[in-house]
């Protein structure tokens, strides 16, 4: 029965116009969540459209902490529901988030991470809600990745802020600009902020101010 029901769900998602908006299939709570409860297909699609649908395939510690904080996490760990993963390709993968393992800012300057310290200093002064750039050793799919949870975690299993930009320590961006920082600190900071701006990783309203601030700092150094 469940297997047939999941096949119907997939068919309905692929051809919603055939099933109609009022079909009971949309409103029944048939999709499992990581807290042992369930939610409807309609609710799941609504979260997906708002870019707030989180999924897990192994109920990792971060996913469990998120459910404990009131964040809905779709549980696809059972083989019956695993095929739905392709249907929710745009969902946020908490298994990937769990692997990031962001590092807290260092209490004292460190040669390798001085660049991020300088960038974060500007972000703190320019943004009403600072989004720190943090080294994430587990990030290997991109150079930079914006992370934003709907609410802060109440009992996080490890350091994981609500909002931050994950930085791949082995990525081209960080390695190149860290090397540049040793030779020209203001220019490296300016280029890093430009990357954040180009990739839309910051508050759009604050971007021009950030770049102007970094540009002035660069000009003062060069003059």
Image (spheres, rainbow, N blue to C red):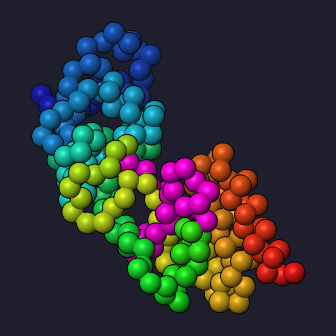
Where is residue 161? Give x, y as percent. Answer: 37, 59
Stretch in magenta: 122-149
Specify whether residue 58 is in view: no
* Residue nearer the viewer, 83 or 137: 137
Where is residue 181? Give x, y as percent. Answer: 65, 84
Specify whether residue 8 is in view: yes
Q: Residue at x 24, y 58 (%)?
A: 156
Furthest residue in direction top, as rendered: 22
* Residue nearer the viewer, 222 or 171: 222
Q: Is residue 4 left or right of residue 175?
A: left
Where is residue 69? Give x, y as percent. Answer: 23, 45
Q: Which residue is drawn at 42% across and 23% down?
A: 15
Furthest residue in direction right, as rendered: 223
The answer to if 45 sits in the magenta stretch is no
Residue 190 in the image: above or below residue 11: below
Q: Is residue 23 left or right of residue 78?
A: right
Where is residue 126? Give x, y as percent. Answer: 62, 57
Q: Is residue 75 left or right of residue 192?
A: left
Of the 4 image quadrants, the one containing the C terminus is: bottom right
Q: Is residue 113 left or right of residue 150?
A: right
Count of numbered marks:
0
Q: Which residue is drawn at 26% across and 26% down?
A: 40
Residue 72 in the image: above or below residue 203: above
Q: Which residue is drawn at 34% across and 44% down?
A: 151
Of the 4 image quadrants, the one containing the N terminus is: top left
């Amino acid at each position: 029965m469940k297997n047939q029901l999941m096949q119907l769900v997939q068919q309905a998602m692929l051809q919603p116009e055939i099933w109609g908006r009022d079909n009971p299939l949309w409103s029944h709570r048939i999709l499992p969540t990581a807290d042992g409860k369930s939610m409807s297909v309609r609710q799941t699609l609504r979260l997906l459209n708002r870019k707030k649908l989180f999924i897990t395939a192994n109920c990792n510690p971060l996913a469990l902490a998120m459910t404990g904080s009131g964040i809905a996490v779709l549980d696809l760990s059972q083989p019956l529901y695993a095929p739905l993963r392709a249907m929710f390709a745009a969902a946020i993968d908490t298994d990937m988030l769990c692997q990031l393992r962001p590092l807290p800012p260092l209490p004292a300057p460190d040669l390798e991470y001085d660049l991020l310290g300088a960038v974060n200093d500007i972000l703190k002064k320019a943004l009403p809600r600072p989004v720190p750039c943090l080294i994430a050793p587990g990030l290997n799919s991109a150079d930079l990745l914006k992370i934003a949870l709907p609410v802060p975690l109440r009992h996080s299993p490890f350091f994981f802020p609500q909002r931050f930009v994950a930085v791949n320590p082995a990525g081209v961006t960080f390695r190149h600009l860290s090397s540049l920082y040793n030779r020209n600190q203001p220019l490296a900071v300016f280029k890093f902020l430009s990357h954040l701006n180009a990739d839309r990783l910051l508050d759009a309203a604050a971007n021009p101010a950030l770049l102007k601030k970094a540009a002035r700092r660069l000009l003062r150094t060069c003059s």
